[in-house]
Amino acid sequence: MAKKLLCILLTAMLLLISCSGGGTETADGSSDAEGSANPDAAQQEETEPEPEPVDPATVFDLEVKDWGGKDLGILGTNWYNINSNWTSLELRCHEMTGEAMNDAVYTRNMNVESKYNVNIVVSDGGAYLDSSITNEVVAGTNSYDIAYPRISEMNNIANSGNAYDMNAIDSLDLSKAWWSQFARENLTVADKILFISGDMNFMDKWTAVCMFFNKNVAASYNVTAGELYDLVDAGQWTVDKFSEYTDAVTNDSNGDGTLDKEDT
């Protein structure tokens, strides 16, 4: 203990010495410590660098408003009705589990509810939402503020006039970095945008559709894997190009006069 105390005292003394003296004694006995007010030294000090400009698109400047406990109704898609996974993963998590994405969604929802005094209510709309949205609009019950339809339903919803132009919502700035600018550009029609995606959507990444081909079958039709990969890399793998290749290989393999699952 005595040795430990001695070490502590020595350390403290060294700190005091280093803080109290760094200068030299002048001829008259006065101290000329380093760091004292010296015009020449001040001029040599480097100026602080200018702060980097902030991109307005990255600044979250939404006004904090008390919504008085209002329900924020969200209608989610559940394609397969398996424990409502498709509805809940990016919209609703019931508790912290230690899994990064689950806990991030849970924390986000809790923060939004607390900061804006709202109650997030997520409803399972089943596999298709267009009829649910139409019924909701006709009934005028206003249960849902936001809906997550599949992209294949967007035309029906848009044509029915049952979606709101998000450009007309003053507090919604779609130029912000967390909205997909690709979606914004390509989904804008006649200066209106009825659908958008962004950082809060991640199920589309988890459910990306892949295409496979049988290299042996391709080779039997003088098509190489490199040929197909080159088309993809060049941005030329289109629906028309896909049809061109499939038309070339489609045939009645068993000769029964009908094209079905038993054929190529």
Image: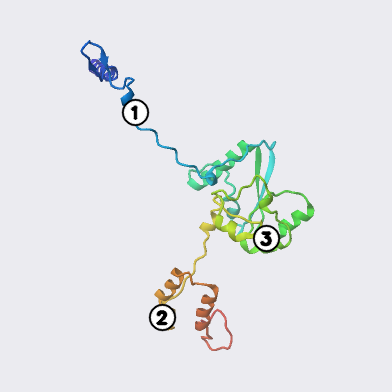
Disc 1 residue type? Gln
User: Residue extending furthest left?
Assistant: 27
Pick out the residue farthest to the top.
Answer: 28
Q: Residues within 10 Å of mark 1 (few under 14, many from 20)?
A: few
Please identify, in this view, whether the residue under mark 2 or under mark 3 is nearer the observer: 3
Percent x, y for residue 159? 72, 63
Circle on res. 24: none
Mark 2: secondary structure = helix
Residue at the spot x=70%, y=56% of the render?
163
In the image: residue 134, left or right of residue 224: right
Task: Please name whichever residue, 94 or 141, is drawn nearer the observer in this view of the structure.
Answer: 141
Indicate the position of residue 187 as horizontal and vertical percent values.
62, 60
Residue at mark 1 to residue at mark 3: CA–CA distance:
60 Å
Whichever of callouts 1 and 2 sits on the residue coming sooner in the sequence is 1
Q: Could you say whether the residue bearing mark 3 is in a helix, strand or loop? A: loop
Residue at mark 1 to residue at mark 2: CA–CA distance: 76 Å
Height in image: 263 above or below 66?
below
- Disc 3 designates what residue? 190
Q: Which mark is residue 219?
A: 2
In the picture, measured across the screen, residue 13 lies left or right of residue 205, that is: left
Packing grade of label 3 (10 A; few <14, some 14-19, many >=20) is few
State the separation of the CA atoms marked 2 and 3.
Answer: 47 Å
Determine whether, in the image, residue 140 is placed left or right of residue 4. Answer: right
Q: Image check: 50 left or right of 158?
A: left
Residue type pointed to by label 3: Ala
87 lies above or below 261:
above
Q: Between tags 1 and 2, which lies in front?
A: 1
- Name the residue carrying label 1: 43
In terms of image quadrants, where is residue 45?
top left
- Within-10-Å neighbours for mark 2: few <14, some 14–19, many 20+: few
